[in-house]
Amino acid sequence: MPPYWHMETTRLLLIEDDEKFCRLLRDYLSPLGYEVEASHDGRDGLARAQLGGYAAVILDVMLPGLSGFDVLRELRRTSQVPVLMLTALGDEVDRIAGLEIGADDYLPKTFSTRELLARLRSVLRRSSITVAARTDARPAPRSLGSLWIDPAARIATLDTQPLVLTKVEFDLLLALVDAPGRVRSREQLLLAAADRDFEAFDRSIDVHVSSLRKKLGDDPRTPRFIETIRGIGYRMLVGAGGAGD
């Protein structure tokens, strides 16, 4: 990857003593734009989680040092980071106990990787909505070259002319404008723009970007705005609509 490309990743902490399982999960999530850090001990995992900087924690119940329940109980004293709990038992009592302590969701280890991804997306999405709801300040308008966006009023203009965008197109544009020059993976754009039916949206994200490009008058072969990073996602050019990158 050329050095001028920078892709933001979503940091996850996996607290799980099965090292093979950790590698499998890392291999599955990494291409989607997730940076998975693993801890194999309850005490170490708690210490890392308390340092912060993670978008979510995936936490096993059965751990050496401290159990997953104890880790979660201590973590909730200082942090509201989303926590997805895993158990080999799948016992309803364990599930209820975890949720009562403060887990955001719960999965038995018989899950498929697609199910884990769907649950992870869901807790991340809910977390971002909660944070936004706690912020009383009106979000400031954004401008990038000839583009201007008002997130609060959900208005976008190009060369002072209004753009007629769907909800998904507006959210995609905002996500790209908020990270000029940085690659946003399809997974990150999905989390920013989809509020339901993730799987269907996942298969059509390129269609939404294509439609957005048309409304911007953008040519994907010689883009002024949105550049395709093959196999990864998209980035908004730093000089979007202006003199160039």
Image: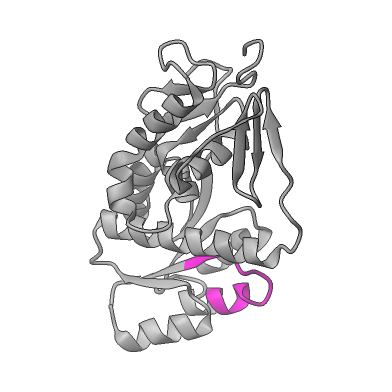
Residue 8 appears anywhere in the view:
no
> In the picture, residue 85 is in which quadrant?
bottom left
What are the residue bounds of the magenta stretch?
72-83
Q: Is residue 234 left or right of residue 205?
A: right
Instruction: Based on the picture, tell me whether residue 129 belongs to the magenta stretch.
Output: no
Identify the residue at the far front of this view: 161
**Is residue 31 placed above or below 102 in the rendered structure?**
above
Residue 179 percent coordinates (x, y): 61, 34
Residue at 50%, 52% in the rendered image? 12
Residue 188 lies, in percent from the top left, at 47, 43
Please tell me whether residue 76 belongs to the stretch shown in magenta: yes
The residue positioned 64% from the left and 38% from the top of the image is: 149
> If the image is split into quadrants, where does the C terminus sit?
top right
Q: Nearer the viewer, residue 146 or 75?
A: 146
- Residue 234, horizontal then vertical, whole percent: 46, 29
Whether 24 is drawn above or below 243: the answer is below
